[in-house]
Image: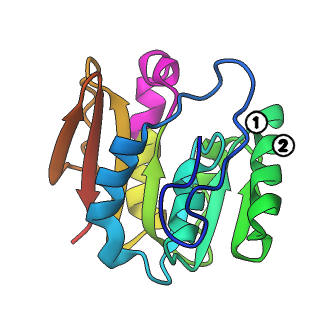
């Protein structure tokens, strides 16, 4: 895993051990960031189910102002913190190790301009109802006006998020990326 563009281009990221995360391919990441580039300069970014922090760190590399990472799995969060330290972006980052549902039920100080919603595939299959509620909390409390949510999931899953309707959907093999924009 690596940063593919921007200030930290080519820098490698520590990947967590085991199957707690599923890395995004460079091709998919490049496609997503090609779409997001006009929104990134000084943007506030949330990387939900962050894993290694690939999306949030890529955002910082490309000019985002701040990234908040949500990762409750302790060993994975420890690796994420090491990635942040290696790139020397601790001043632009925050790692939240709490359950994402309790955090998202509280209103933040500032809303996010870009939110990456990238739950583990098994989470999506086993806890779909909770993910629908999370989407409602994101829409109600966390997404800035004009903000965008990037929702990545297995193409075989057909979860509907009524609070966050898709404005663009792209399929990359077995993976789908939905872009959801708040007017």
Query: In which quadrant of the rendered view does residue 67 lie?
Result: bottom right
Q: What stretch of residues is rendered in magenta?
A: 119-132
Q: Nearer the viewer, residue 95 or 4?
A: 4
Q: Residue at x 46, y 37 (%)?
A: 24
Q: Residue at x 65, y 55 (%)?
A: 11
- Residue 14 screen position, x and y as percent: 73, 41
The label on residue 78 is 2
Query: In the image, 104: left or right of 115?
Result: right
Q: How many marks?
A: 2
Query: In which quadrant of the rendered view does residue 138 lie?
Result: bottom left
Magenta span includes 130: yes
Q: Residue at x 52, y 27 (%)?
A: 120
Q: Residue at x 47, y 63 (%)?
A: 5
What separation in Å lies between label 2 and label 1 (alpha carbons)?
Answer: 5 Å
Asked whether the beta carbons under mark 2 and mark 1 sit within 8 Å of each other, the answer is yes
The label on residue 76 is 1
Q: Quick one: SS at disc 1?
A: helix
- The quadrant of the picture occupied by the C terminus is bottom left
Q: Is residue 145 visible?
A: no
Secondary structure mainly formed by the magenta segment: helix
């Amino acid at each position: 895993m690596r940063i593919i563009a921007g200030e930290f281009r080519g820098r490698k990221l520590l990947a967590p051990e085991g199957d707690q995360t599923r890395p995004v391919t460079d091709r998919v990441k490049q496609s997503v960031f090609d779409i997001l580039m006009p929104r990134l300069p000084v943007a506030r970014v949330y990387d939900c189910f962050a894993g290694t922090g690939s999306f949030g760190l890529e955002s910082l590399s490309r000019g985002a102002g701040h990234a908040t990472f949500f990762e409750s799995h302790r060993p994975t969060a420890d690796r994420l913190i090491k990635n942040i330290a290696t790139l020397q972006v601790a001043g632009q980052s925050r790692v939240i190790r709490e359950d994402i549902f309790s955090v998202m039920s509280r209103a933040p100080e500032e809303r996010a301009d870009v939110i990456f919603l990238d739950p583990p595939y098994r989470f999506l299959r086993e806890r779909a109802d909770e993910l629908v509620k999370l989407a409602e909390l994101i829409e109600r409390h966390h997404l800035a006006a004009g903000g965008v949510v990037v929702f990545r999931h297995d193409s075989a899953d057909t979860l509907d998020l009524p609070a966050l309707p898709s404005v663009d959907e792209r399929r990359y093999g077995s993976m789908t990326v939905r872009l959801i924009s708040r007017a």
